[in-house]
Image: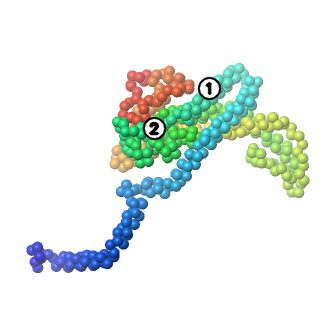
Amino acid sequence: MKSKGGLNMHPCSSVLHLLLRCMRGCCRHTRSRVPRRLRRHVSYIRLIFKSLYFNSLTNSDVVTDSILEPVFWMVEVVTRWFGMVFVFLVVALTSSVVFIAYFCLLPLVLHTYSPGWMIWHICYGHWNLVMIVFHYYKATKTPPGYPPKMKTDVPFVSVCKKCIIPKPARSHHCGICKTCILKMDHHCPWLNNCVGHFNHRYFFSFCLFLTLGCMYCSVSGRHLFIDAYNTIDQLKHLEAEKQGVPVTGIGLLIGIVPSAGVAGKAVQEVSQPPYTYKDRMFHKSVIYMWVLTSTVSVALGALTLWHALLITRGETSIERHINGKEAKRLAKRGRVYRNPFSYGKLNNWKVFFGVEKRSHWLTRVLLPSGHAPYGDGLTWDIYPLKKDMMPV
Ligand SMILES: [Zn+2]
Ligand SMILES: [Zn+2]
């Protein structure tokens, strides 16, 4: 059989060809029956619906982020509004411990300790306190660093979708501060400030010295705590015996003791306790201080260790997440990911603390120092320390 174009065609192909033509004709016929205006409306609605979810870059992460978006929004709002409350909490709790240390423990140290221990406690305690206060103040008051809003020649890696400004390497957008932050680590509610290029060192030093301070209080106050706990325990037992109620358990520590008689026993007036009000307050203060400082030592100690690990690797908290993903992606291709902002373990610490010579370990790390970090936080392509500048 010869086709119109003179080409040889298989009989089956000709039947299929006819069938397709027939179907196309049918469709055209059906379409023409639907009013053009209605068709336009339907396609417009379909487009709007698709615009809600369609993205050529959509993956499981984008979907998860979209689902969790209300949760993130809630956390951001709460953190923004309660920022000052968190700062007040830090100041109030630290002040309460300092108050107890000055009015309960210091007189005890001066009366009972040997001169050597007395000097150690007074010197260490005050140095630690100065370091905590200095670094907390600097961490809250120092702006983390922001990318320029105007057009500059600074090289950038992407554009912030929310600020609509170029984003230099290592900078990220903070939803709570509603701006981009240079070398952003995280937004810290306890500081009511973002941790970025210019205050990262203050934040870490604050965590480190607060952990050391809490550990110092916890370790040096452990005997006092045991004594205070036993005393309060005995006191509660004495009171409870007078009331005719057997008392056991942790309720003693937090003051949960039955005030009324049990099994039909009448309520009796508690006679004068063997300890004065001042003694009770002293013991309760020691227990409060020990429980608070021990808890903070463990929780903040873990956080400080985590940040120390990140600094050793030359990463921020955000980069740890990004680099982890990138490392996995490259590992699948048989390649190894190398962090471009890491200068080696020890050098990362020197860069972080701004240590250029040996004496800086004392003056810039162990003493309060307001020196600026290396670089402007915009460019990261230059190795910040010359080899010959690092004798340490
Ligand atoms: Zn931004
Ligand atoms: Zn922030």
How packed mark 2 is, by other alpha carbons closer than 10 Å (few <14, some 14-19, many 20 or more), is: many
Query: Circle 2 is placed at which residue position?
Result: 146
Relative to residue 45, is residue 317 drawn left or right? right
The residue closer to the viewer here, 188 or 323, is 188
Quadrant location of the N terminus?
Answer: bottom left
Residue at mark 1 to residue at mark 2: CA–CA distance = 33 Å
**Ligand 1 within 8 Å, label 2 CB:** no
Determine the image quadrant of residue 123. top right
- The kind of residue tagged 2 is Tyr
In depth, the one of 77 and 239 nearer the eye is 77
Is 319 placed above or below 35 here? above
Answer with the quadrant where ligand 1 appears in the image.
top left
Amino acid type, mark 1 = Trp
Measured as percent of width and height from the top left, residue 79 is found at 57, 46
Q: Nearer the viewer, mark 1 or mark 2?
A: 2
Identify the residue shown where x is 47% and y is 43%. Answer: 179
Residue at mark 1: 127
Q: Earlier in the sequence, mark 1 or mark 2?
A: 1
Seen in the picture, residue 208 relative to 49 is either above or below; the reply is: above
Residue at image location 19% in from the left, 76% down from the top: 13
Report how many numbered discs are placed on residues in the image: 2
Task: Please name the residue shown 44% across and 48% down the image.
Answer: 162
- Can residue 146 be seen? yes
